[in-house]
Amino acid sequence: MLRPLRILRLVTMLSVLQRTAGTAIRGRIAIYVGTASALLIFVAALAVLDSERGHAGASIETFGDALWWSFVTVTTVGYGDYTPVTAVGRLIAVGLMIGGIALLGIVAATLASWIVERVAERDAEMESAAVDHIRALETQLEDMRGMLAQALGRDRDR
Protein backbone atom coordinates (compact mmCIF):
# COMPACT_ATOMS: atom_id res chain seq x y z
CA MET A 1 0.00 0.00 0.00
CA LEU A 2 2.88 2.40 0.75
CA ARG A 3 4.90 1.48 -2.34
CA PRO A 4 3.84 4.65 -4.20
CA LEU A 5 5.81 6.61 -1.59
CA ARG A 6 9.00 5.29 -3.20
CA ILE A 7 8.61 8.06 -5.74
CA LEU A 8 9.82 10.45 -3.04
CA ARG A 9 13.32 9.10 -3.71
CA LEU A 10 13.32 11.40 -6.73
CA VAL A 11 13.63 14.33 -4.33
CA THR A 12 17.18 13.33 -3.43
CA MET A 13 18.13 13.04 -7.09
CA LEU A 14 16.60 16.41 -7.89
CA SER A 15 18.61 18.19 -5.20
CA VAL A 16 21.79 17.34 -7.10
CA LEU A 17 20.45 19.16 -10.15
CA GLN A 18 19.54 22.35 -8.27
CA ARG A 19 22.02 25.24 -8.18
CA THR A 20 20.82 27.84 -5.70
CA ALA A 21 19.23 27.34 -2.30
CA GLY A 22 16.01 29.11 -3.23
CA THR A 23 15.64 27.14 -6.42
CA ALA A 24 16.41 23.90 -4.62
CA ILE A 25 13.76 24.57 -2.00
CA ARG A 26 11.21 25.52 -4.62
CA GLY A 27 12.09 22.39 -6.60
CA ARG A 28 11.56 20.21 -3.56
CA ILE A 29 8.30 21.95 -2.77
CA ALA A 30 7.11 21.37 -6.34
CA ILE A 31 7.87 17.67 -6.08
CA TYR A 32 6.25 17.40 -2.65
CA VAL A 33 3.14 19.25 -3.81
CA GLY A 34 2.85 17.17 -6.95
CA THR A 35 3.28 13.91 -5.07
CA ALA A 36 0.98 15.00 -2.25
CA SER A 37 -1.67 16.05 -4.76
CA ALA A 38 -1.53 12.74 -6.59
CA LEU A 39 -1.67 10.76 -3.35
CA LEU A 40 -4.45 12.93 -1.94
CA ILE A 41 -6.57 12.52 -5.06
CA PHE A 42 -5.94 8.79 -5.30
CA VAL A 43 -6.57 8.05 -1.61
CA ALA A 44 -9.67 10.27 -1.52
CA ALA A 45 -11.03 8.52 -4.62
CA LEU A 46 -10.52 5.12 -3.02
CA ALA A 47 -12.00 6.25 0.30
CA VAL A 48 -15.09 7.84 -1.21
CA LEU A 49 -15.65 4.85 -3.49
CA ASP A 50 -15.48 2.55 -0.47
CA SER A 51 -17.89 4.68 1.52
CA GLU A 52 -20.37 5.38 -1.31
CA ARG A 53 -20.54 2.18 -3.36
CA GLY A 54 -23.75 0.28 -2.82
CA HIS A 55 -25.61 2.95 -0.86
CA ALA A 56 -29.03 4.12 -1.96
CA GLY A 57 -28.87 7.29 -4.07
CA ALA A 58 -25.09 7.13 -4.44
CA SER A 59 -23.81 8.54 -7.72
CA ILE A 60 -20.20 7.39 -7.20
CA GLU A 61 -20.21 3.69 -8.10
CA THR A 62 -17.00 3.16 -10.10
CA PHE A 63 -13.37 4.06 -9.56
CA GLY A 64 -13.49 6.33 -12.62
CA ASP A 65 -16.39 8.27 -11.12
CA ALA A 66 -14.58 8.48 -7.79
CA LEU A 67 -11.38 9.69 -9.45
CA TRP A 68 -13.31 12.32 -11.44
CA TRP A 69 -15.12 13.44 -8.28
CA SER A 70 -11.78 13.64 -6.45
CA PHE A 71 -10.16 15.80 -9.15
CA VAL A 72 -13.16 18.10 -9.32
CA THR A 73 -13.34 18.44 -5.54
CA VAL A 74 -9.62 19.02 -4.90
CA THR A 75 -9.60 21.84 -7.46
CA THR A 76 -12.66 23.34 -5.74
CA VAL A 77 -14.53 23.36 -9.06
CA GLY A 78 -17.30 21.08 -7.83
CA TYR A 79 -19.44 20.44 -10.92
CA GLY A 80 -22.03 18.63 -8.84
CA ASP A 81 -22.41 15.72 -11.24
CA TYR A 82 -21.11 13.35 -8.55
CA THR A 83 -21.76 14.02 -4.89
CA PRO A 84 -21.30 11.87 -1.81
CA VAL A 85 -24.48 10.94 0.04
CA THR A 86 -23.05 9.21 3.11
CA ALA A 87 -21.70 11.02 6.16
CA VAL A 88 -18.27 9.42 5.72
CA GLY A 89 -18.22 10.42 2.05
CA ARG A 90 -19.05 14.00 2.97
CA LEU A 91 -16.30 14.05 5.60
CA ILE A 92 -13.86 12.82 2.96
CA ALA A 93 -15.10 15.62 0.69
CA VAL A 94 -14.47 18.23 3.40
CA GLY A 95 -10.96 16.90 3.94
CA LEU A 96 -10.29 16.91 0.22
CA MET A 97 -11.53 20.49 -0.13
CA ILE A 98 -9.28 21.65 2.71
CA GLY A 99 -6.38 19.74 1.20
CA GLY A 100 -7.00 21.32 -2.20
CA ILE A 101 -7.06 24.81 -0.76
CA ALA A 102 -3.87 24.11 1.19
CA LEU A 103 -2.10 22.80 -1.91
CA LEU A 104 -3.22 25.85 -3.89
CA GLY A 105 -1.87 28.06 -1.10
CA ILE A 106 1.49 26.30 -1.25
CA VAL A 107 1.70 26.82 -5.00
CA ALA A 108 0.80 30.51 -4.62
CA ALA A 109 3.35 30.98 -1.82
CA THR A 110 6.08 29.30 -3.88
CA LEU A 111 5.33 31.55 -6.84
CA ALA A 112 5.34 34.62 -4.59
CA SER A 113 8.67 33.54 -3.10
CA TRP A 114 10.17 33.28 -6.59
CA ILE A 115 8.89 36.73 -7.55
CA VAL A 116 10.22 38.29 -4.33
CA GLU A 117 13.63 36.70 -4.91
CA ARG A 118 13.79 38.10 -8.45
CA VAL A 119 12.81 41.59 -7.27
CA ALA A 120 15.39 41.45 -4.46
CA GLU A 121 18.11 40.43 -6.92
CA ARG A 122 17.21 43.32 -9.22
CA ASP A 123 17.17 45.77 -6.30
CA ALA A 124 20.60 44.54 -5.20
CA GLU A 125 21.93 45.05 -8.73
CA MET A 126 20.48 48.56 -8.89
CA GLU A 127 21.87 49.43 -5.46
CA SER A 128 25.29 48.13 -6.45
CA ALA A 129 25.22 50.23 -9.63
CA ALA A 130 24.20 53.32 -7.63
CA VAL A 131 27.03 52.80 -5.14
CA ASP A 132 29.53 52.40 -7.98
CA HIS A 133 28.23 55.59 -9.60
CA ILE A 134 28.54 57.52 -6.34
CA ARG A 135 32.12 56.29 -5.88
CA ALA A 136 32.99 57.38 -9.42
CA LEU A 137 31.51 60.84 -8.73
CA GLU A 138 33.48 61.09 -5.46
CA THR A 139 36.67 60.24 -7.34
CA GLN A 140 35.94 62.89 -9.95
CA LEU A 141 35.21 65.43 -7.22
CA GLU A 142 38.53 64.68 -5.50
CA ASP A 143 40.35 65.05 -8.82
CA MET A 144 38.65 68.40 -9.43
CA ARG A 145 39.58 69.60 -5.92
CA GLY A 146 43.19 68.65 -6.59
CA MET A 147 43.18 70.48 -9.92
CA LEU A 148 41.58 73.51 -8.28
CA ALA A 149 44.16 73.52 -5.49
CA GLN A 150 46.98 73.35 -8.05
CA ALA A 151 45.44 76.18 -10.06
CA LEU A 152 45.05 78.36 -6.94
CA GLY A 153 48.62 77.55 -5.91
CA ARG A 154 49.94 78.76 -9.29
CA ASP A 155 47.97 82.00 -9.02
CA ARG A 156 49.49 82.74 -5.60
CA ASP A 157 53.00 82.13 -6.90
CA ARG A 158 52.60 84.77 -9.60
Image (cartoon, rainbow, N blue to C red):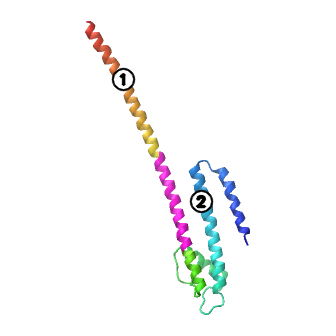
Residue at the far bottom in the pictured view: 56
Q: Is residue 68 left or right of residue 152?
A: right
Residue range (magenta): 98-121
User: Is residue 72 among the parts visible in the rendering?
Assistant: no
- x, y (%) of residue 14? 66, 54
Q: Quadrant of the N terminus?
A: bottom right
- x, y (%) of residue 94? 55, 78
Question: In the rendered image, which residue does mark 1 sit on?
Answer: 142
- Residue type at mark 1 is Glu
The residue positioned 58% from the left and 49% from the top of the image is 21
Question: In the rendered image, which residue does mark 2 sit on?
Answer: 29
Q: Which disc is residue 50 wearing?
A: none
- Residue type at mark 2 is Ile
Mark 2 lies on a secondary structure that is: helix
Tell me the CA gap for discs 2 and 1.
52 Å
Give the answer, above or below, for where 28 lies relative to 157: below
Mark 1 lies on a secondary structure that is: helix
